[in-house]
Amino acid sequence: MKILLVSVNASYMHTNVAIRSLKAYADSHINDSSLQIDYAEYTINQPIGEVLRSIGFTGADMVLFSTYIWNAEYVCKILPDIKKILPECVVGAGGPEFGYGARKYLKMLPALDFVMFGEGELSFTELAKTGISSLSQIKGVYYRDSQNTVVYSGDQPLIENLDELPFAYPEILRGDFDPDHKIYYYESTRGCPFSCAYCLSSVDKRVRFKTLERVQQELQIFLDANVKLVKFIDRTYNLNPDRYIPIWQYILSHHNGKTMFHFEIEAEYLSDEALDFLQKVPSGVMQFEMGVQSSNKETLKAVNRSDNTEVLSQKIRRIPRTIHQHLDLIAGLPYENLEIFGHSYDYVMDLRPDALQLGFLKVLNGTEMAEFASKNGWKWMENPVYETFSTPYLSFADVAFLKDIEVATDAYWNKEIFSFTMAYIFRKLRPWVFMCEIVNFGRKQDAFLQARRELYWFELLSKYIEYIEENCESVQETGEVLDFKLMKDLLRYDFVRSGKKGNFPEWYVHRYDKDKHRSLLDKHDMLGNSRIGFALSEYEEFEYDVTSKKPEENPGHFELLIKYGEK
């Protein structure tokens, strides 16, 4: 029998650890030369016909899909056609989306023979051993009985000792992998002790751990292979300081100078010992994703999260800037209207994260939030990704406005292209006020009707600065006096430092002097080859020291050589 495990990923760079773990576990427990288990990865951007041909040429007897909210629509389109090209093939699915919606999908998709629920390794191994004829004897499976009624076989016990799980990436051990263009996901724990109402991880509250020794052995594989990015998928990494700090210590003492490790952190629970240790971590070793979700205490209590926002902000501020910090907010939570969400936005921006991810509440089957939302007036997408349309506190128009705030935040903050301009603006204005201003201004320019390139956002901000210079009343509520000349200088500096420009846009005032450019190249020992020197640099003049932390305190005349290609 030939079994094909299929993952449809969000992009090429992603790897699916679930299908690899199923294969590795089954291979280690089944000694049957007639059984062949393979996996195939595609992306949601590939033509469906191309994927179907690929699956068809495998000649698989069983195809099992790994499903999530981001690929469920694609899987629903492709799954019914599998049996048209492989008539005898058994088709199944697993993963959180089909697992928690098993009855719905089995009724909706006649070509779907069964759904696996839960973590999967034990159920899949039994299935691989015995085949579909014994589905009723395999725990953790939804299937149709002889009356065409959907039946659940009962819960499969969890794997208590995670050290029983083989390393999920044997291709790395074989040397058959892409270290630079793939993200490798890694789990050292399963389960989550917290009860966040909107999260499926809250369903399994028993946390199981791999031993420290096993984690260190597997991390060394990634380090020896010079993998670029390893993402821990532990729902909350920092549960036990006696465990998570030694893992960090191992990474730091064995680091290869290349691999970045990503962790999901509950910053409020970082110990003083952990925070002291983090001061030693240099750039390029770790990045943290930290879920703030809201700063409104009533909201946090409603979704079963800690409301100790004071301690949270104190802990985050103690994390050194050498660690890339990614903070999350969720729009659409209880008791949060636009005004209250704005305070949450400012709370996060006051921490100056490297990136602010503005997410939107997804009402997932199986969560406490799903029941609460259905009883209290939430409206959300009927199908994946189940994103919120409106709440009792946010109208559809409010949610659409926040969608534009998300785009503006990504353009003006997360990409770090406008760092100097934003640093000044956010010292003078509430970040929320500025983002609302730029969104309202941008909507008049149809800025959010289509995807825009980087140059467009420079042009829009230039127009906005001109507008508020002429109509200062638009930001008078802040009580701050804005230096528009400085803002234009900072915008020009952000633009010119972002890369060598072949042409300058109409809004940009280029104050160029070739002789002064040559003089500065000579001063910086870059005239050995003048053609290359000019190509790798730019000359510009400013009326403020735009490179200083507070340029508003340093007016004058400044001639700068901007050098490109430097790390």
Image: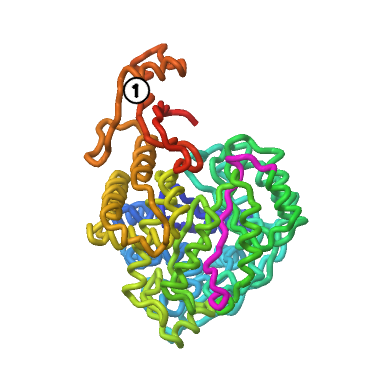
Residue 285 included in the magenta stretch of the image: yes
> Can you tell which quarter of the image residue 148 is in?
bottom left
Position in image of residue 314 (x %, y %): 65, 59
Which of 412/171 is in front?
412
- Name the residue at 61% across, 67% down: 309
Across and down, in percent, residue 403 comes to: 36, 64
Q: Is residue 34 visible?
A: no
- Residue 369: tell me if it is visible: yes
Q: Residue at x 46, y 48 (%)?
A: 423
Coordinates of residue 440 in the picture (x, y in percent): 30, 63
Local secondary structure at mark 1 = helix
- Identify whether 107 is placed above or below 26: below
Colouring of the image: rainbow
On the image, numbered disc 1 is attached to which residue? 535
**Number of numbered callouts drawn:** 1
Magenta-tinted stretch: 280-300
